[in-house]
Image (cartoon, rainbow, N blue to C red):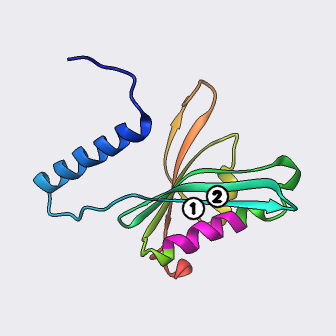
């Protein structure tokens, strides 16, 4: 046996197949294919920011969300999250998840309607906290 550097795309395909096989062997749950999403904002050809992630079964996960400093506090982050949320609702998602750091956008996500479901101090480095956040789209305020 050897362990080698391997293409991320090929490795993810192999891992997904193994995990789907494992799920079939060990549960009656559905098997689903992850669907990636990516939305970007431009003004006069200039990139302003974007959001990306994936949907798997009934959950949408936001992997990345960022805007250029010059356009922050102008509603772009909210517009990008709205686009992702609309994608989630159109694809029958019940949940949206996102992770953030205390020095990033925790309060923005809380204001948007996410709840903190877990936090880990000193992660990914000492002196900071990582937050794991969830939005329940089945809750009355999101339907």
Q: Position of residue 48 (x, y in %)?
A: 79, 54
Any magenta on residue 132? no
Q: Which stretch is magenta?
A: 79-88
Is the Cβ of the residue at disc 2 closer than 8 Å to that at disc 1? Answer: yes
Q: Position of residue 138 (x, y in %)?
A: 44, 76
Residue beneath disc 1: 114
Magenta stretch, main secondary structure, is helix
Any magenta on residue 87? yes
Q: Quadrant of residue 125?
A: top right
Viewed as shown, does residue 142 lie left or right of 4?
right
Circle on res. 52: none
Q: Residues within 10 Å of mark 1 (few under 14, many from 20)?
A: some
Q: Residues within 10 Å of mark 2 (few under 14, many from 20)?
A: many
Q: Is 76 rendered above or below residue 65?
A: below
Q: Position of residue 77 (x, y in %)?
A: 72, 60
Viewed as shown, does residue 58 lie left or right of 90?
left
Q: Quadrant of residue 31?
A: bottom left
Q: Is 14 rendered above or below residue 97?
A: above
Residue beneath disc 2: 109
Q: In the structure shown, which secondary structural element does the residue marked by tag 1 occupy?
A: loop
Measured in 3D between alpha carbons, the distance from the residue under mark 2 to the one under mark 1, in whole angstroms, is: 6 Å
Q: Earlier in the sequence, mark 2 or mark 1?
A: 2
**Quadrant occupied by the N terminus:** top left
| Residue shown at 42% from the left, 75% from the top | 92
Q: Residue furthest left?
A: 25
Q: Residue furthest top?
A: 2
| Residue shown at 50% from the left, 76% from the top | 89
């Amino acid at each position: 046996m050897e362990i080698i550097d391997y293409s991320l795309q090929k490795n993810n395909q192999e891992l997904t197949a193994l995990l789907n096989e494992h799920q079939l062997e060990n549960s009656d749950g559905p098997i689903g294919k992850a669907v990636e999403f990516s939305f970007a904002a431009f003004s006069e050809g200039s990139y302003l920011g974007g959001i990306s992630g994936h949907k798997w079964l009934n959950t949408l996960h936001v992997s990345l969300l960022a805007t250029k400093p010059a356009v922050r506090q102008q509603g772009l982050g909210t517009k990008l999250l709205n686009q992702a949320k609309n994608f989630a609702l159109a694809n029958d998602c019940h949940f949206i998840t996102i992770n953030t750091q205390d020095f990033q956008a925790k309060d923005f996500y809380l204001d948007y309607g996410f709840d903190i479901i877990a936090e880990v101090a000193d992660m990914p480095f000492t002196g900071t906290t990582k937050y794991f956040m969830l939005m329940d789209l089945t809750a009355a305020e999101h339907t």
